[in-house]
Amino acid sequence: MENLDKASNFLDRVDGGPRSPNAVDRRMVTLTAPASAAAEQYRTLYYRIERLRDLKTLKVVALTSAVPGEGKTLTAVNLALTAARANPDRRVLLVDADMRRGQVASCLGIRFWPGLAELLADECQASDAVRRFKSTRLMVMPSGKPPEEPTQMLASARMRQLLKALREGFEEIYVDLPPALPFADASILGAQADGVVVVVRANVTSQKNVRLALEHLKGMPFIGCVLNGAQPDAAPYLKLY
């Protein structure tokens, strides 16, 4: 098994559509279309990471992208849902750490607060911020209401203490980080993860932004890139990177 940075991953394009505010986004294919080719790609990605766990500790896996709109949240949510279904005996948590533009709650059709922001501000208890998603075994911590200083919150001692406590309470933790550019948020929290995955959107993300993002994340426990929105003939696209 090669590391993710040597064996690139492809995720099929999944188009969005109108839905009710409380409905699960249909792009959450591991729930809405578990037999689809797209859902199978998330399972493939999950088991690649699972095999890496034989080589190193990967309790906390963080996902980011260079800029917004590349599908990092889509990937993080589907990956966490896949993990919860694949190992029902494990405690799996999905954390939305993008406190500027958190989208996890919207994808799952759940309330976005109280969440991480309120917990870090000592405005709620962990039992209020973490809740089970419907009938699955996945636990979710949404981002909460956007705070005035998200970078300071993520860099705080309270955030480090929270992550330590979460490590003790869960076997697998997936963290949806903010985009790597232009803020420091992703690098701050990425340094506390066991592995960082960068999501790149096919035919959208520029080479320059990919390079800048990887430079921004230098020193992080980088385990690879995921090519999102890929078409069957996307292999030549990787040569640009």
Image: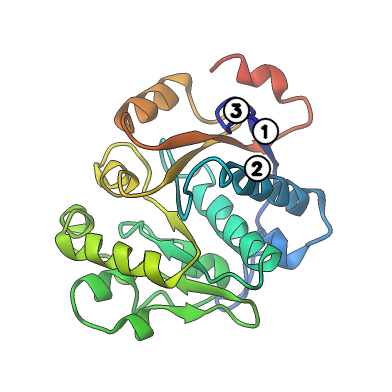
For label 2, the crowd category at 10 Å Cα-Cα, with few meaning under 14, some 14 to 19 and many 20 or more, is some
* Above or below, comparing residue 64 to residue 124 in the picture: above
The residue drawn where x is 41% and y is 47% is 194
Q: Nearer the viewer, mark 1 or mark 2?
A: 1
* Residue that carries the numbered disc 3 in the rendered image: 203
* Residue that carries the numbered disc 2 in the rendered image: 48
Q: Nearer the viewer, residue 25 or 154?
A: 154
* Badge 2 element: helix
Of pointers 1 and 2, the one earlier in the residue sequence: 1
Q: Say what amino acid the circle numbered 3 marks.
A: Asn
Q: How far is the residue under mark 3 from the one under mark 2?
A: 24 Å
The image quarter containing residue 4 is: top right
The image position of residue 43, as x and y in percent, is 71, 52
The image quarter containing residue 180 is: top left
Q: How far is the residue under mark 1 from the one under mark 3?
A: 27 Å
Q: Is residue 54 left or right of residue 184?
A: right
Cβ atoms under marks 1 and 2 closer than 8 Å: yes
Q: How many labels sit on residues?
A: 3
The residue drawn where x is 21% and y is 82% is 123
Of pointers 1 and 3, the one earlier in the residue sequence: 1
* Residue that carries the numbered disc 1 in the rendered image: 1
